[in-house]
Image: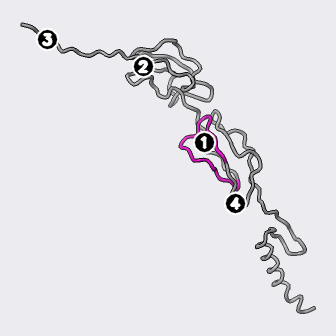
Amino acid sequence: MTVFFPLTEVTLVICNLPDRNRNHLVNWSTRQAGRLGAVVRYKCEEGYSSPGGQALQATCTRDGWRPDPLCEGTQCDLPPKVENAVVGSPPQQKYITGSEVIYKCRDQYTLLGNSMITCNNGNWGQRNISCTSLLPHHKNVTGLGPFCVDSISLLQSLLKYAVENINYYREV
């Protein structure tokens, strides 16, 4: 009697060394590829950390090194508000190290300073942005009271002045 045993296919799982640049690694404890189940310690570049704050260990699995990604950028809060401005770049779900935000001034305002800020290590870079009115404001010009110099505001101010002072001219 002949007994046959089913052959099982054995696959050797090897995890290649991760790309240091893509994964933001500064230290990987081995210079060799890992076999299934191998555990390797690593360190992320400044401004990056292991997802979920896990220990900086990677395990070789059938799907490659885990965690994946090995390192991710430190997250910033939502971009700061700038008076008379809106964020002009598309909104992101997460703002991580290297994320950039561009501000645009509202209508009738002009930008002073740099329109872009960058997330770095969980903090937004220096904000040197302000939006200033394009319309100069004047006060009490020839008794008309405060008004903006644009054709509609000027016309409204003159009309108001005339209506308020019409009796004065009738009496003279």
Q: Residue type at mark 1? A: Asp
Disc 4 crowd, CA 10 A, few/some/many (<14, 14-19, 20+): few
Q: Which residue is mark 1?
A: 77
Q: Position of residue 124 (x, y in %)?
A: 67, 39
The quarter of the image holding the N terminus is top left
Q: Which mark is residue 60?
A: 2
Mark 1: few, some, or many residues within 10 Å (few <14, many ≥20)? few
Could you tell me how far apart the alpha carbons at marks 1 and 4 are, in whole angstroms? 27 Å
SS of the residue under disc 1 = loop
Residue 115, percent from left and from top: 71, 46
Residue 45 in percent (x, y) is at 60, 24
Range covered by the magenta-colored residues: 83-102
Answer whether residue 89 is magenta in the image.
yes
Question: Disc 1 vs disc 4: which is toward the camera?
Answer: 4
Q: Amino acid at mark 3?
A: Phe
Q: Residue furthest right?
A: 172
Q: In the rendered image of this protein, does residue 3 appear above or below residue 84?
A: above
Compute the Cα span from label 3 to label 4: 82 Å
Residue visible at 26% across and 16% down in the picture: 9
Alpha carbon of mark 3 to alpha carbon of mark 2: how far? 34 Å
Residue wearing tag 3: 4
Dominant secondary structure of the magenta stretch? loop
Assess disc 2: are there few (<14), some (14-19) or many (≥20) residues with their C-alpha within 10 Å of its C-alpha.
many
Residue type at the position of mark 2:
Cys
For marks 1 and 4 on the same chain, the one whose residue lies earlier in the sequence: 1
Label disc, if present, on residue 107 of the rendered structure: 4
- The residue shown at (52%, 12%) is 31
> Where does residue 22 sit, x and y in percent of width and height?
55, 27
Residue sitting at x 51%, y 30%: 51
Q: CA distance from mark 3 to mark 1?
A: 64 Å
